[in-house]
């Protein structure tokens, strides 16, 4: 995976999260909590899917129905899994997340502060 290839499209990110969803659910805060530690690629995409409301949060990811039946989304080539992975790469490019290329893991960038973003207003 090449992080350098990801392009940050702020309008697309806002559209993806929805202005109302951001204001109501504060997904950035929730993602901050969920990815506070280094998190593998698939788990990070799963957590993003939960925050976007794509599936409910499953408490026991290793139980009788691992990942609530969503694991195939991250282990196979498909548009939804690729979109989630692309969104994570965009968040890395925007400085929201850090990426450990050697271990293919993500975590929240503790230095990220949206108020210091120098992008378009």
Image (cartoon, rainbow, N blue to C red):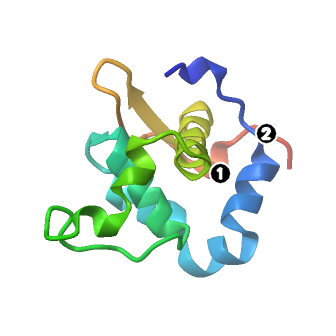
Relative vertical location of residue 49 with respect to residue 94 in this rendering, above or below: below
Q: Quadrant of residue 17?
A: bottom right
Location of mark 2 (residue): 119
- Residue occupying the point 41% across, 46% down: 74
In terms of secondary structure, where does tag 2 sit?
Answer: loop
Q: Dot 1 surroundings within 10 Å: few (below 14), some, or many (20 or more)?
A: few
Q: Quadrant of residue 20?
A: bottom right
Residue 29 in sight in this render: no
Q: Position of residue 82 (x, y in %)?
A: 56, 42
Q: Quadrant of residue 50?
A: bottom left
Residue 103 in sight in this render: yes
- Residue occupying the point 70% across, 60% down: 16
- Residue occupying the point 44% across, 52% down: 73
Left or right? Give the position of 38 relative to 90.
Answer: left
Q: Position of residue 86 (x, y in %)?
A: 59, 39
Q: Dot 2 surroundings within 10 Å: few (below 14), some, or many (20 or more)?
A: few
**Among all residues in the image, which is located at the extreme left?**
63
Q: Position of residue 34 (x, y in %)?
A: 34, 59
Res. 115 mark? 1
- Nearest-to-viewer mark from 1 and 2: 2
Q: Nearer the viewer, residue 24 or 82?
A: 82
Q: Nearer the viewer, residue 45 or 36?
A: 45
Left or right? Give the position of 84 relative to 120.
Answer: left
**Among all residues in the image, which is located at the extreme right?**
121
Q: Position of residue 51 (x, y in %)?
A: 49, 67
């Amino acid at each position: 995976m090449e992080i350098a290839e990801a392009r940050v499209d702020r309008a697309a990110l806002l559209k993806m999260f929805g202005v109302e969803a951001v204001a109501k659910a504060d997904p950035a805060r929730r993602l901050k909590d969920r990815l506070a530690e280094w998190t593998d690629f698939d788990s990070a995409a799963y957590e993003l899917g939960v925050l976007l409301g794509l599936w409910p949060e499953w408490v026991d990811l290793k139980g009788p129905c691992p990942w609530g039946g969503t694991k195939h989304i991250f282990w196979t080539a498909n548009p939804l899994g690729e979109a989630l992975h692309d969104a994570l790469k965009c968040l890395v490019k925007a400085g929201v997340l850090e990426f450990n290329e050697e271990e293919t893991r993500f975590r929240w960038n503790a230095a990220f502060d949206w108020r210091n973003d120098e992008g378009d207003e």
